[in-house]
Amino acid sequence: MKEENSKAKELSDKLFYRKKSVYEYTDSAHVEKAYDYAKGYSAFLDAAKTEREAVREAIRLATERGFVPYALGDKVSAGGKYYYNNRGKSLYLFTVGTEPLEAGIRISAAHIDSPRLDLKQCPLYEDGGMSFFKTHYYGGIRKYQWVATPLALHGVVVKKDGTVVEVCIGEDDSDPIFYINDLLPHLGHENDRKPISEAIPGEKLNILVGSRPFDDSGNKDAIKLNTMVLLNEKYGITEDDFLSAELSVVPAIKARDVGFDRSMIGAYGHDDRVCAYPALSAIFDCADSTHTLMCVLADKEETGSDGNTGMKSDLFLDLITELSKALGADPAMVRANSKCLSADVSAAYDPNFPDVFEKRNTPLLSAGVVLTKFTGSRGKSGTNDASAEYIGWLRRVMEDDGVVWQAGELGKVDCGGGGTVAKFLAEHNIETVDLGVPVISMHAPCEVIAKVDLYEAYRAFCAFCRT
Ligand code: MN
Ligand code: MN
């Protein structure tokens, strides 16, 4: 009997697939490295709360590592490290390898925009002794999460003469913060009965920005006037300058370790900086690969990847075409032989909400980087469904490097769904699959990730760049 048991144990170890915790399958030195790596990531998060800031920070880091600006039509050469800055909102970094370009490019594509509240074009008004900004939310948010919480204002105002004014208020400890009023529980009886999706309608997401009038005259709009006077003094802008501004309201919080064991990070915008950062550091650290590498930091993923800074923009094809021209390659061949990791987050299993997750196929926190064969909703609608052949190749690549990874999909079949940039790369005849970090409370003002998953993502991107 005993012998049969041990035989069964041996066989199940050999034959069964089991998710591995990073802690179980690595040693403490590995975990220390992961926690150390997370420090650089937290600094990146604090420096890059919007796509514009992420582009600026990525360029700063790339420049330190010898990357130089590239313009369409420029010559490139093996060993070169380049970046293409697309309108300050998306970034394409690439390194040219020693093998022919027609062997394909190793592409990692993440996005650097995150859900937030954008100011409307006529935002400022006064009501009830306070001044406010009207907002229009950007991306998928649960609106109730954004009220009664400290907020910061980031972005640019472009004046009629072309001058660009940078705005960032609410991040420094000495800065004021902003706020969205919420209903007190004492008067919330009626409101409490509404479905959560209706409790805070979009038009109630108004940002509290002032309450002091310009003078004691009692004139109408004296508080609005005072707000405008202060903005004019600080930024030299008038109300019509909001017409050509991109101002975003984001949580005024910094990335912080979570838990007694400091094993996790709580921050705004893990989706998708938690993939953008490891993809970026992998191209930095693997720039000497024989392969040509590209790291895409895309904008507009949260609203559908549209526009000239989104992943659907022809710029991606133009860059491949121009690179091919510069290196004497056929762009169709280059694309046909390229491989892509669509670097985006997945939802980690949350024991607080077990009903929406299918436990056998949901990513677990601390079980490593997640490979997602398909995304989409309902019957795989809107998905890039990666081929078994490509996943087979990638399994080998990761496992040969000891990367701890897990397969996973986003929640139960009929509970909702979501997409990534994967399908927009795959439609150019590029092998593409989703790979990223599991997130708790995705799209919330403060999301949580595990440091060991972040590190395995970095190691997966490195294995992909080098193999
Ligand atoms: Mn995402
Ligand atoms: Mn998202």
Image (cartoon, rainbow, N blue to C red):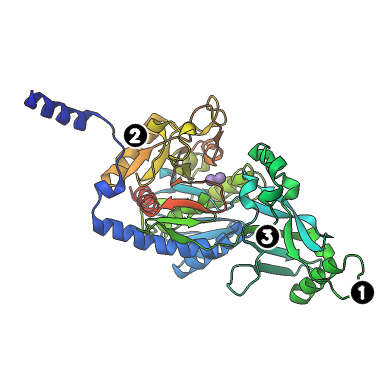
Amino acid type, mark 3: Tyr
- Mark 3 or mark 2, which is nearer the start of the sequence? 3
Crowd band around label 3 with a 10 angstrom C-alpha radius: few (<14), some (14–19), many (20+): many
The quarter of the image holding the N terminus is: top left
Label 1 sits on a secondary structure element that is: loop
Residue 58 is tagged as none
- The span from disc 3 to disc 1 (Cα, nearest Å) is 27 Å
Mark 2 or 3, closer to the camera: 3
Quarter holding residue 50: bottom right
Is residue 212 left or right of 303 when viewed as pictured?
Answer: right
Label 3 sits on a secondary structure element that is: strand
- The span from disc 2 to disc 3 (Cα, nearest Å) is 49 Å
| Nearest the eye: 464 or 231 | 231
Residue 72 picture location, percent across and down = 59, 56
Quarter holding residue 96: bottom left
Q: Is residue 332 visible?
A: yes
Residue farthest along the front direction in this orientation = 186
Amino acid type, mark 1: Ser
Q: Residue at x 25, y 59 (%)?
A: 29
Label 3, on which residue?
179
Residue 392 is tagged as 2
Q: Residue at x 49, y 41 (%)?
A: 335
- Mark 1 or mark 3, which is nearer the start of the sequence? 3
Label 1, on which residue?
217
Is residue 78 left or right of 52 when viewed as pictured?
Answer: left
